[in-house]
Image (cartoon, coloured by chain):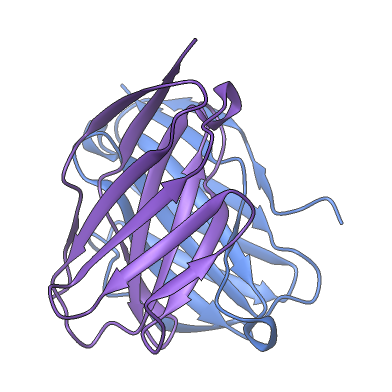
Chain colours: A blue, B purple
Amino acid sequence: DAGVIQSPRHEVTEMGQEVTLRCKPISGHDYLFWYRQTMMRGLELLIYFNNNVPIDDSGMPEDRFSAKMPNASFSTLKIQPSEPRDSAVYFCASSLRASGYEQYFGPGTRLTVT
Amino acid sequence: GESVGLHLPTLSVQEGDNSIINCAYSNSASDYFIWYKQESGKGPQFIIDIRSNMDKRQGQRVTVLLNKTVKHLSLQIAATQPGDSAVYFCAASFYGQNFVFGPGTRLSVLP
């Protein structure tokens, strides 16, 4: 398997623009997680899905953030409108609960909002 | 809520020496813990995990110790190698959900 795939790897956008980050989990995994990493706050869990259903979105910073998982092989994290403080590295991770709690992380998307 | 912290933000060790990275957590209900390694420009990579019904678990050159009494865990790396240079994170969860990550410790291996 190719592992968790994220796109784009880098995104630079202007404040106020819409940003969509994409994730393809490992085939067969039933959990998908979105994280944000900054120097100040470290790794923060934003939202996670089980079998495409959002389970806990309490980590989503505000209404400007939304996440969807239309099928088992694809998820998006959207920020609209984007703000400079959203600049961070966004990671997607997936896991197979039957095999334990280990999460496999993607390479991340580095987002810069100017 | 849960918070996870580390005792040292950076750690430098000589190649061949053993490394010990510490982590404290706040939620006594946490029952599952993971150590991750993150190299520059990459996502975190699983190293080893431990459940709260254990106090020690060993992997290849790594050992995790869990002290539930003081809510502390540590990662020990034996015979540290240059390839071990990275940022190490601990994470705590309850029943494998809502993982809370610590801020990370940067391990530098000196030749």
Residue at x 30%, y 30% (from the top left corner): A15
Residue at x 40%, y 43% (from the top left corner): B88
Locate residue A9: give its quadrant.
top right
With respect to residue A48, does B81 lie above or below?
above
Left or right: where B109 falls relative to A84: right
- x, y percentage for residue B11? 29, 29
With respect to residue B91, does A19 lie above or below?
above
Residue at x 16%, y 64% (from the top left corner): B3
Using the rendered image of the protein, determine whether residue A19 is visible from the camera's viewpoint: no
- x, y percentage for residue B35? 44, 57
Q: Depth check: B91 or B14 in front?
A: B14
Residue at x 45%, y 29% (from the top left corner): B17
- x, y percentage for residue B52? 36, 84
Left or right: where B103 falls relative to B79: left
Is the N terminus of chain A in the top left, top right, bottom left or bottom right quadrant?
bottom right
Count of residue discs: 0
Q: Depth check: B55 or A60 in front?
A: B55
Using the rendered image of the protein, determine whether residue B33 is visible from the camera's viewpoint: yes
- x, y percentage for residue B93? 34, 77
With respect to residue A79, does B3 lie above or below?
below
Determine the residue located farthest toward the right in the rendered image: A1
Is the C terminus of chain A in the top left, top right, bottom left or bottom right quadrant?
top left
With respect to residue B28, does B111 lie above or below?
above
